[in-house]
Image (cartoon, rainbow, N blue to C red):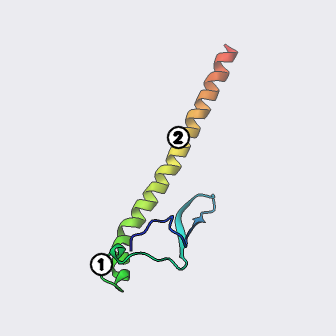
Amino acid sequence: MLCDMKSKGITVKGIPYMDGAHVYNEVYLDDVHMPAKYIIGQENEGWAVVNVLAGFEDPISIWLWVLSRLWKRLLSSVTLTREMADCYHKMH
């Protein structure tokens, strides 16, 4: 089913990696009610849909995580380079 993740009864908790970042989440559905129009595929056949979608999700999630880590490193390098340039200009 498709649903608004801010709906009453839906709780999302990040699963952190050792470095504190997270890509995956635990999702809890506690007494959540959704209209039948939000069902994807046939009723009681959700596992088949999950298997298809999971094949697309994992590689994308991993690449997004890798890109975010590379972006953070790039920003750190830019900051360090600026600080070194400022130091150099103050000395000369």
Place of residue 31 in the rendered image (x, y in percent of width and height, measured from the top left): 53, 80
In this rendering, position of residue 9 left or right of residue 1 = right
Residue type, numbered disc 1: Gly
Judge from the rendering whether residue 8 lies leftward or rightward of residue 49; answer left or right: right
- Mark 1–mark 2 Cα distance, whole angstroms, equals 43 Å
Name the residue located 61 percent from the left edge and 33 percent from the top edge.
80
Find residue 11 and report its horizontal and vertical position in percent: 56, 70
Q: Quick one: SS at disc 1?
A: loop
Image-based side of 63 in relation to 88, left or right: left
Q: Residues within 10 Å of mark 1 (few under 14, many from 20)?
A: few
Residue shown at the point (39%, 70%) measured from the top left: 2
Q: Amino acid at mark 2?
A: Leu
Which of the numbered marks, if any, corresponds to residue 74? Answer: 2
Residue corresponding to mark 1? 41
The correct choice, above or below, for 65 with respect to 27 in the image is above
Q: Earlier in the sequence, mark 1 or mark 2?
A: 1
Q: Residue furthest top?
A: 92
**Residue at 53% from the left image edge and 50% from the top image edge:** 69
Q: Looking at the image, is 75 positioned above or below residue 9?
A: above
Which element carries disc 2, helix, strand or loop? helix
